[in-house]
Image (spheres, grey):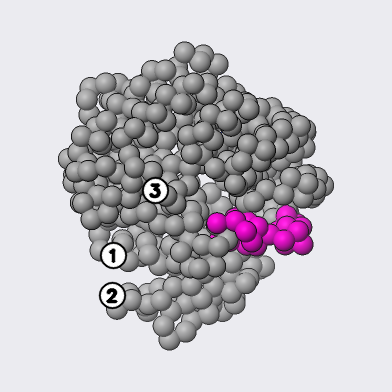
Amino acid sequence: MTLLEKYDIPAPRYTSYPTVPYWETDQMNESEWMHHVVRVFEKDRRLSLYVHLPFCEKLCTYCGCNKHITRNHAVESPYIQSVLAEWAMYQEQFPGKPVLTELHFGGGTPTFFHPDNLKQLLDGLLATVEVAEDHEFSFEAHPASTTREHLETLFSLGFRRISVGVQDVDEDILRVINRFQTVEQVQYVTDAAREIGYESVNMDLIFGLPFQKQEHIRKTMAWIQKWMPDRIAFYSYAHVPWMKNGQRAFDENDLPDTVAKRALYETGKRIWEESGYHDVGMDHFSLGKDALFQSAQSGILHRNFMGYTPFFTPLSIGLGASAIGDTFTAFAQNIKTVAAYETAVASGHLPLQRGHLLSQEDQLIRQHILNLMCRYQTSWQQEDQRDKILARLAEPIADGLVVVGPNGVKVTDIGKGFLRNICLAFDERYWGKVPTGRVFSQAV
Ligand SMILES: C[S@@+](CC[C@H](N)C(=O)[O-])C[C@H]1O[C@@H](n2cnc3c(N)ncnc32)[C@H](O)[C@@H]1O
């Protein structure tokens, strides 16, 4: 059996530990969550804020994110009022003014919203915080709906990074995934952003999409070489049709098999490395001048629900439907549907749904997984159950994915392609209750 066949098993992507299916609290208690938030805030006023803007005009069938499809733009205002009302509930509890280090607008499609509405939202958020000198404000820009006015408005409010959703440039692949955008639109957004003064342009791409072949990846890469984004997120297509109805539009037979899928990844990676990009962490590449690469070099790269970020902020709050907050000792996720989210906020309560309180062991394992995901190595701690972890790592070690030293483990170059499998060996929650049904996407 080849390494690809052996390791192409369902495994988490580890944007959190414990992973969401293992969270223990189905109904997160508001005062408990606030207790964790305030405890962190009292020690350190820095804050990372994520705002989920869930609306999209059309359904991209590959999409694994939480979204609400509508063409009715009358939904914008009430949603923004709800997000501001949710923010006010946090404000009331903070014993001081937060220092905003990170702000990310994700979706859905943030550029679904009219720039005036985004400004109203930002004016409300920024009026009550100090903005850190070294801050990162970014948003997800759909090439088909991002206007110059969006870019200018958000720039004037401190945004310096955009993340453009490209996925693939080929018209046939875009048609299959029901995504309507052109390379001219990507070009326009990229050029306009740079002209206005944005410091970093990220592009999201996906390999392993239905019917995607080498020729499509090569075509996309040729455009990437022209655009030269500062960062590239090259995601492995996560096929989870049992959770995402849109993905039922195609089945497993339409998808490249494991070997073909990995070959798509290798083609992309090779072309970028030739063009001066560095491998930063799982699925991420960046140019040497970009903050993400520099933080990877200096060992401070961090990974959270938004993906990789250049630094760690102890407190993250998520506003909006389905958004997740994190105090390192607790996670809390908001209600997912827009209507139920807005109703909960209107009742004067935090719109929390599920969550998790991290035990000491969870925190220890979380740190190991972060170390592996961000630094490709981790060091043993006194409390570790090394024998258990090493027994689970026996095959990855024999296959040359990991090397074990007296102080810890190190991922090899081959192992970098199997990071999810290596992290799985540390995942005590998973091994305590291995899923019987379909829960995670395939690791390759
Ligand atoms: C929250 S989505 C929103 C992007 C924005 N709405 C747009 O379409 O431009 C962020 C990114 O997640 C990635 N993504 C979404 N669904 C995925 C899936 N099933 N597998 C892998 N990546 C996925 C895409 O690359 C996408 O750009």
Residue lying at 62% horizontally and 59% vertically, measured from the top left: 289
Q: Is mark 1 within 8 Å of ligand 1?
A: no
Residue lying at 57% horizontally and 22% vertically, measured from the top left: 57
Which of marks 3 and 2 precedes in the sequence?
3
Q: Please identify the quarter of the rendering in which residue 390 is found.
A: bottom left
Kind of residue indicated by mark 3 = Ala
The residue segment tinted magenta is 267-291
Kindly identify which numbered label has been placed on residue 132: 3
Which of marks 1 and 2 precedes in the sequence?
1
Q: Please identify the quarter of the rendering in which residue 399 is found.
A: bottom right
Residue lying at 48% horizontally and 34% vertically, measured from the top left: 157
Q: Quadrant of the N terminus?
A: bottom right
Provide the residue designation for mark 2: 383
Kind of residue indicated by mark 1 = Glu
Provide the residue designation for mark 1: 361
Q: State the count of labels.
A: 3
> Do labels 2 and 1 touch, CB within 8 Å?
yes
For label 3, the crowd category at 10 Å Cα-Cα, with few meaning under 14, some 14 to 19 and many 20 or more, is some
Tell me if residue 293 is in the magenta stretch: no
